[in-house]
Amino acid sequence: MEKEIITPKNVAKPAAPYGSAVKVKSTGSLIFVAGVLSCDIDGNVIYKGDILEQTRQTVKNLIATLEAAGTRPENVVKTTTYVVSSVMKDFFETKSFLEALTPFNRPADTLVGVASLAGSEQGQLIEIDAIAVAD
């Protein structure tokens, strides 16, 4: 797979480590990963109320899902990150956004502040979905 990060000269550069656009040349298949949470193997939300640790666990779970699907983190070309609005300030102050994107080599990303997520009643604060190219 060949991945080119596109940053137009006449548009503001992204504030976080993501690409404005990603151009992919590949003979591989696309993998669409549903929203991944910071849950343990039994589906229990862990690190309740801690956006940094939840982000780290969500990324670990996303990487495990990608590997199970036959690809690597650097083959991710698009992510959507959903963060409960009440912790959005903490998401930036703790640099959690860097934890969320760094393993994926600058995918195109959209960050969405939401009122709640599936699992919010158990303390879920972040969810990430992804599109990747198989090796």
Image (spheres, rainbow, N blue to C red):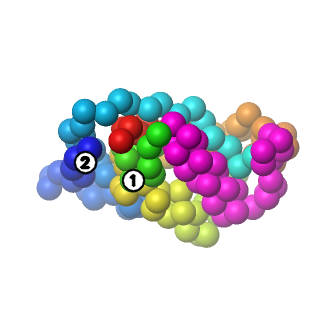
Along the horizontal axis of the image, is 4 left or right of 133?
Answer: left
Alpha carbon separation for disc pair 1 and 2: 9 Å
Q: Is residue 20 left or right of residue 46?
A: left
Indicate the amino acid at tag 1.
Glu
Q: Position of residue 134 (x, y in %)?
A: 38, 38
Given residues 111 and 134, the one toward you in this image is 134
Local crowd at mark 2 within 10 Å, few (<14), some, or many (≥20)? some
Residue located farthest toward the bottom when viewing the structure as drawn: 94
Task: Give the quarter of the figure containing the N terminus.
Answer: top left
Left or right: residue 131 versus residue 9 is right
Say if the magenta span includes residue 104. Answer: no
Do residues under tags 1 and 2 come within 8 Å of each other at their CB atoms?
yes
Using the rendered image of the protein, determine whether residue 11 is visible from the camera's viewpoint. no
- Circle 1 residue: 74
Range of residues picked out in magenta: 40-69
Name the residue at 31% across, 52% down. 19
Q: Quadrant of residue 94?
A: bottom right
Q: Main secondary structure of the magenta part?
A: helix
Q: Which residue is mark 2?
A: 3
Label placed on residue 120:
none
Mark nearer the N terminus (1 vs 2): 2
Three-letter amino acid code at disc 2? Lys
